[in-house]
Image: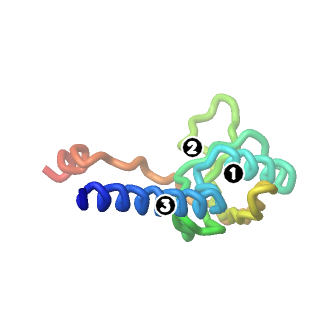
Amino acid sequence: MRWQIGLVGGLVALVAIGAAALYVHMGAAPTCENERAVVRVSRILHDDYHLDSVFMNNVKTVTGGYFSDSRDCSAEIAQIKGGENASTLPWREIRYRIVSQGKSEPPAVTVQLGDNVPLAPPVLSFWERLRANL
């Protein structure tokens, strides 16, 4: 009988901790790869920097964790041009910040356009790296 009460108490505590974590995470800023955030960045690039149809590559979270109310992100962008290979396009670095403004409003996104950068090389798998070193 005692172990059943302990089991029920443990389950109740586990559910309460999970619910609290979910509640806090719901107020956190979206991830850097979040579709709505990327669409907002694309819209800002179009409206403020007059860049239409861009590729985004190498999107990374610079700061901000699972429960953070803001995230700093970096990526590389190139404007799409017909008939050109993406690796030959001029790539530029961007930094963008996503700040949660509460549950009733969408997050605020700000973008800074940086200098030209080389296209990031593709990330090799473990087996590809091993094969290259042998």
- Closer mark to the observer between disc 3 and disc 2: 3
Q: Residue at horizontal 58%, vertical 60%? A: 25
Residue type, label 1 = Ala
Question: Residue pushed farthest top?
Answer: 83
Q: Residues within 10 Å of mark 3 (few under 14, many from 20)?
A: few
Residue type, label 3 = Ala
Question: Which percent across, then down, holds residue 106?
Answer: 78, 54
Residue assigned mark 1:
37
The answer for how far apart the CA atoms under marks 3 and 2 are is 53 Å
Give the mark nearer the N terminus: 1 vs 3.
3
Residue type, label 2 = Thr
> For this rendering, which residue is in front, 12 or 23?
12
Residue assigned mark 3:
16
Residue assigned mark 2:
88
Q: Residue at horizontal 63%, vertical 60%? A: 93
Question: Which percent across, then down, holds residue 75?
Answer: 59, 57
